[in-house]
Image (cartoon, rainbow, N blue to C red):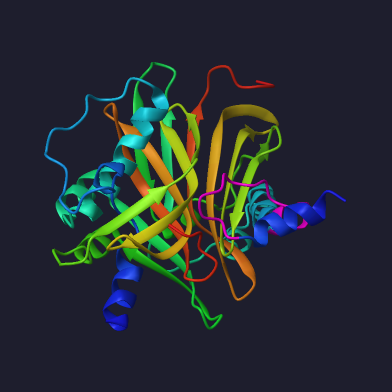
Amino acid sequence: MIFLPLLLAAAAPAADKPPAPASTSDAAAVMAPLKAWFAGIDATDATAIRAQIRIDGGGGATVAVNRPDGTKQVRHITWEDYLAKIKPGEHRYHEQFTGSPTIQIDGDIAMVWGDFTLSVDGKVATCGVDHFDLVRENGAWKVQNVTWSQRTAGCPGA
Amino acid sequence: MRFVLTAFVMLAPLAASAQTRSTDRLPPANPLPPPTSEEGQVMTPVNAMFDGLARRDSAIILAAMRPDATAMVAAEKADGTRSVRRLSAAEFAAGVKPGPERFEERLSDPAIEIDGDIAMVWGPYTFLVDGKVHHCGVDHFDLVRESGSWKVANVTWSSRTTGCAAQ
């Protein structure tokens, strides 16, 4: 019952109205590439992750790191540089959302904002917030930009 | 005229501040004091981009964006066709040139999220040309703070010309 009003709200003109929550089915469609992405991290599979990205020569990953010594750094890397780092090695990585991320959708644009932890060899190593920026083309949602905060202090489960 | 409008719909769908609503003249260059709330600080580069569009001043826009920033537009035309297109910050700003039309963008009730040095702003907008609604959609800003200053890392917006709320 709740889905119908949400869908109607999504179909109505968006201008001058506060953002409405996304419907469950729409939210699942937006989350699908992120699930596949996280599975790609688990499997150290750069090809699987690449398939979730709109590769167009622009965009990429931006990370705002807060180091244990209190220093900060903002770094932007291209998608190709990001993907080049995803390769089999001696460590196992696992990234997950620790709560329910916020999802917003309007037509062919969407955003996902949520707390995450990144584990290395089964132990939480860093945490922060993932901010995914997605667009839909030919019916498929793809990530066109991701930004995250990254810290090592106060991470859940660390 | 229509073609001209189409060109800048793609390049410059953001604009204006509330100060310009009731007058044909641009506001005087006496900026408000910096906001003290975190949300206000996050909105500073967003409002600067709107201001740069209203003034049709590409330098103001570029100053609010990181050099590696991009602008992404997902447009729905009246005939139902859709397109997604990315512009670099330089390409985006280059589309904002002095001209006779008065641009104004109104962002309403934006959702703002902040975590440390990253933030996002998401909210519906209407874009007005010479005081008339031209198109509407949702603006999505991706921001990062570096050396104490928030900058736009990416802006994505949806754009449609049908179903926009009346001005």
Q: Residue A137, position in %: x, y?
A: 57, 72
Identify the image quadrant of the N terminus of chain B. Answer: bottom left
Corner quadrant of residue A12: bottom right
Query: From what the image shows, is residue B133 above or below residue B81?
Result: above
Q: Residue at x 66, y 57 (%)?
A: A10
Between A52 and B78, the one nearer to me in the picture? B78
Along the horizontal axis of the image, is B20 left or right of A104?
Answer: left
Q: Residue furthest right?
A: A1
Between B67 and A77, the one nearer to me in the picture? B67
Q: Residue at x 57, y 64 (%)?
A: A108
Q: Residue at x 34, y 29 (%)?
A: B41
Identify the image quadrant of the C terminus of chain B. Answer: bottom left
Question: Residue B66: in sight, yes or no?
Answer: no
Question: Residue B103: in sight, yes or no?
Answer: yes
> Magenta residues, as a range?
A13-29
Q: Residue A66, position in %: x, y?
A: 42, 25
Predominant secondary structure, magenta span: loop
Q: Residue B120, position in %: x, y?
A: 47, 40
Corner quadrant of residue B163: bottom right
Along the horizontal axis of the image, is A63 left or right of A88?
Answer: left
Q: Residue B86, position in %: x, y?
A: 39, 66
Q: Residue furthest front?
A: B22
Between B25 and A102, the one nearer to me in the picture? B25
Query: From what the image shows, is residue A1 above or below residue B100?
Result: above
Magenta stretch: residue B153 in it? no
Along the horizontal axis of the image, is A38 left or right of B65?
Answer: right
Q: Residue at x 55, y 57 (%)?
A: A134
Along the horizontal axis of the image, is B5 left or right of A94?
Answer: left
Magenta stretch: residue A16 in it? yes
The mark tally for this picture is 0
